[in-house]
């Protein structure tokens, strides 16, 4: 009897003292910036004061909600009472809110992050330095059917287990450029709808040892599956960025954009890899629109003729385009890009698979203009900016017109592919 009373007393003690702590661990904290210093780790910038971050518990369930711009994460080192470690971070967390967070330095840890969370909201996450680690999901544009979100990585590292760029009917854009690094340990899903990662089939995994249970079986994308996904854009900007991920799915309403640094291309591009040695996979699924494309390639500055690797899958991995196994046609490059001189191929290089694009410069001035390479100041359309263009402008234009600056900027430049003096343009 005494033992039973002691056990009962212990249970009551847990209910009275421990349960309130568990409830407190799921506390919602709202950004107020009462100290007006915009520092994320300052307790008094939150209501109530965010003090349960001490000890670094990402499983505490703390729910940080932001509806303002200007927030700065400069996380003190591990062990410092202000080291940024939290459960959930929901940016742009109310309808029609505009919110922006910039990660500048230090190492921070979160369990789950949503960059834009509610209807009509616009959320932005900038990573300029330090290491921002997300143990679970990183959702860019989430929940609200009209939400919009941006992630801009120009330095430092953003790491997460999984990333969904746009779910339901939201609009999400991720840009990795500068010296920024993106590490995703499981999967990037560009388009997601109805709680499923769209665009990847069971068969496509082949011998992969880790198959997420929520991946939908293969079915031709149509109005039902396509219309339920978000609009997603993933941009690799320049040759110094680093992107490492085991799998990428590029579904309906999704696009991968590569902005090449001239002859340096996009450096290592997107590297598909698995720590456990399983298969890397990049899967393109075309929309039900026959004109839909999932790949866009541009030069940041001068066009440079050559072949460039955009995506590399390791030994045992694969890159699949056009969703042929689903019986759906389509194309990765638009007609305009093909007219500019672009083509693509999926090739085997050693033990790797690579998605490569080749740029062939136009062979005439007319072809260069038709492909969209006309100089801004070339009014006459002869691939030169000279007195003829100046005369045409003064005949029809006003010297105060901003367009006159285009002639001044491009003065005596040319980009006729047949003229050696114009080779500067084509690198």
Image (tube, grey):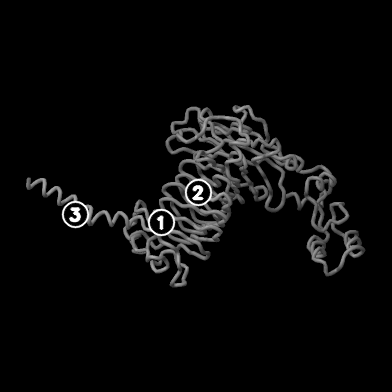
Q: What distance separates the C-alpha of mark 3 from that of mark 2?
A: 39 Å
| Residue 53, horizontal then vertical, whole percent | 35, 60
Residue labelled with disc 3? 13
The x and y percentages for residue 29 are 40, 61
Q: Residue at x 46, y 43 (%)?
A: 185
Which residue sits at x=53%, y=64%? 69
Towards the viewer: 70 or 265:
70
Q: Does 233 sit left or right of 42 as displayed?
A: right
Secondary structure under the numbered disc 2 in the rendered image: strand
- Residue 160 or 66: which is nearer the viewer? 66
- Which one is nearer the viewer's eye here, 43 or 382? 43
Residue designated by label 1 = 63
Residue 179 appears in view: no
Compare marks 1 and 3 and give the one earlier in the sequence: 3
| Residue neighbourhood size for the residue with mark 2, other residues' Cα within 10 Å, grouped as few (<14), some (14–19), many (≥20) | many
Residue 48 in the figure: left or right of residue 347:
left
Tell me where residue 149 appears, x and y as whole percent. 56, 53
> In the structure shown, which secondary structural element does the residue marked by tag 3 occupy?
helix
Q: CA distance from mark 2 to mark 1?
A: 15 Å
The residue nearer to you, when weighing 143 against 389, is: 143
The Cα atoms of the two marked residues, 1 and 3, are separated by 27 Å
Dot in front, 3 or 2: 3
> Counting other residues with Cα less than 10 Å from the Cα at mark 3, is it few (<14), some (14-19), or many (20 or more)?
few
Dot placed on the residue nearer the N-terminal end, 3 or 2: 3
Residue drawn at the location 51% of the way across and 33% of the way down? 216
Quarter of the figure with the N terminus: top left
Q: Which residue is mark 2?
A: 139
Callouts 2 and 1 close, C-beta under 8 Å: no
> Horizontal placement of 386 versus 154: left or right?
right
User: From where the camera sits, is residue 227 visible?
Assistant: yes
Secondary structure beneath dot 1 equals: strand
């Amino acid at each position: 009897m005494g033992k039973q009373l002691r056990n009962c007393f212990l249970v009551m003690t847990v209910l009275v003292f421990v349960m309130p702590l568990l409830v407190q661990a799921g506390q919602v904290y709202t950004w107020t910036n009462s100290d007006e210093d915009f520092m994320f780790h300052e307790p008094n910038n939150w209501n109530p004061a965010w003090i349960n971050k001490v000890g670094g518990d990402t499983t505490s369930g703390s729910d940080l909600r932001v509806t303002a711009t200007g927030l700065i994460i400069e996380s003190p080192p591990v062990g410092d009472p202000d080291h940024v470690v939290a459960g959930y971070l929901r940016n742009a967390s109310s309808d029609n809110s505009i919110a922006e967070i910039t990660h500048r330095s230090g190492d921070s840890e979160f369990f789950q992050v949503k960059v834009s969370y509610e209807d009509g909201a616009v959320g932005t996450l900038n990573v300029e330095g330090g290491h921002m680690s997300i143990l679970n999901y990183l959702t860019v544009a989430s929940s609200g059917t009209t939400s919009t979100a941006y992630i801009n990585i120009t330095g430092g590292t953003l790491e997460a287990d999984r990333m969904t760029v746009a779910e339901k009917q939201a609009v999400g854009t991720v840009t990795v450029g500068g010296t920024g690094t993106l590490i995703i340990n499981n999967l990037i899903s560009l388009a997601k709808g109805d709680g499923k990662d769209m665009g990847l089939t069971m068969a496509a995994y082949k011998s992969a040892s880790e198959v997420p249970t929520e991946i939908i079986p293969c079915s031709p994308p149509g109005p039902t599956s396509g219309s339920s996904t978000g609009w997603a854009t993933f941009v690799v900007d320049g040759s110094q960025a680093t992107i490492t991920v085991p799998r990428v799915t590029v579904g309906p309403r999704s696009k991968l954009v590569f902005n090449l640094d001239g002859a340096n291309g996009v450096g290592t591009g997107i590297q598909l890899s698995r720590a456990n040695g399983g298969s890397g996979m990049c899967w393109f699924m075309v929309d039900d629109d026959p004109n839909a494309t999932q790949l866009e390639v541009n030069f940041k500055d001068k066009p440079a003729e050559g072949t460039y690797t955009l995506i590399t899958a390791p030994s045992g991995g694969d890159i699949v385009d056009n969703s042929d196994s689903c019986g759906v046609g389509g194309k990765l490059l638009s007609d305009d890009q093909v007219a500019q001189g672009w083509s693509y191929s999926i090739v085997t290089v050693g033990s790797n698979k690579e998605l490569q694009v080749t740029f062939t410069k136009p062979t005439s001035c007319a072809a260069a203009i038709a492909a969209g390479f006309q100089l801004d100041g070339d009014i006459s359309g002869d691939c030169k900016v000279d007195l003829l263009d100046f005369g045409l402008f003064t005949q029809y234009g006003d010297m105060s017109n901003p367009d006159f600056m285009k002639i001044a900027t491009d003065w005596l430049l040319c980009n006729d592919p047949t003229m050696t003096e114009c080779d500067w343009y084509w690198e």
